[in-house]
Every structure is written in C-alpha cells, then in structure tokens.
Amino acid sequence: MSVPPLTDAQREELRQALVALQDELRDMLDLSADGAKPVELDQPIGRLSRMDAMQQQSMTRANRLEAENRLKRVESALSRVEAGTYGACLSCRQPVAFKRLQAQPDALLCINCQGAKDR
Ligand SMILES: [Zn+2]
C-alpha cells in the first residue's frame, strides 16, 4: 500500500495551510511576548496568586518555546514547498499521505517512520 505523491492542488492547499499556521504562530508569539515578562502589577499579589502567576509565566514560556519550534518546522516546510521537496518523508523519501499532512502540514516523517521513531 504505497502512498501516492501530492497533486499540485493538494500541495497548494497544504502551502496555504502552512502560511496560515505561520501567521497564527507569529501572532501567538507576538501576543505572548508580554506574558513572558515578570508578573504584572495590576494582578493581586497574594502569596498564592503570585505562585499562580509564576506558574502561568513558566507555562507561557513553555508554550512560547513550543510555538517557536513549531514555527521553525513550518518555515522549513514552506522552504521545502519552494524547493519542490515538500511531501516526501525526510527519512525514507517516500511520499507522506495527504491526509496526514492535512492534519499536520509541518509533519516531517511518514506515518511508518514516525511510528518507528515513537516506539
Ligand atoms: Zn518514512
């Protein structure tokens, strides 16, 4: 059961999804830039709420890191679209299923290689 390579229309659909994802991630990083700063003064700073705020802050940092990493993946996927190598598994070079890319346009590996990696 080999996977057919992407058609031009599918590739274009995924390119648009990647661009949308890129915008979304950039917006998120812009918005959360404030959240990564020290605790705001308009918040009630009791001992507990301060701990909450600090916890929130470290979550924001983790989310930012996650978003930054994903943005890098999305950007490298877009450059592979430009280069004409998008849609091929980076490990086995076989086409990645369109449905998989629809769910995760920045996926690097086909389902088989991803499965082997997670195991
Ligand atoms: Zn593969």
Image: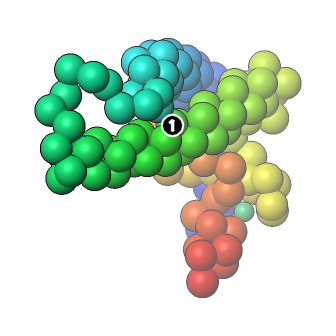
Q: Quadrant of ligand 1?
A: bottom right
Q: Quadrant of residue 110?
A: bottom right
Q: What quarter of the picture does the N terminus occupy?
A: bottom right
Residue 114 at x, y percent in the picture: 62, 67
Name the foreground residue: 71 vs 111. Answer: 71
Residue at x 56%, y 51% (from the top left corner): 97
Residue 101 at x, y percent in the picture: 53, 43
Colouring method of the image: rainbow
Q: Quadrant of residue 22?
A: top right
State whether residue 43 is above or below residue 114: above
The residue beneath circle 1 is 64
Q: Is mark 1 within 8 Å of ligand 1?
A: no
Q: Is residue 44 left or right of residue 8?
A: left
Q: Is residue 33 visible?
A: yes
Name the foreground residue: 36 vs 105. Answer: 36
State whether residue 27 is above or below residue 43: above
The residue lying furthest to the bottom in this view is 119
Residue 86 at x, y percent in the picture: 73, 35
Residue at x 48%, y 22% (from the top left corner): 33
Q: Is residue 69 left or right of residue 38?
A: right
Q: Is residue 43 left or right of residue 112?
A: left
Q: What quarter of the picture does the C terminus occupy?
A: bottom right
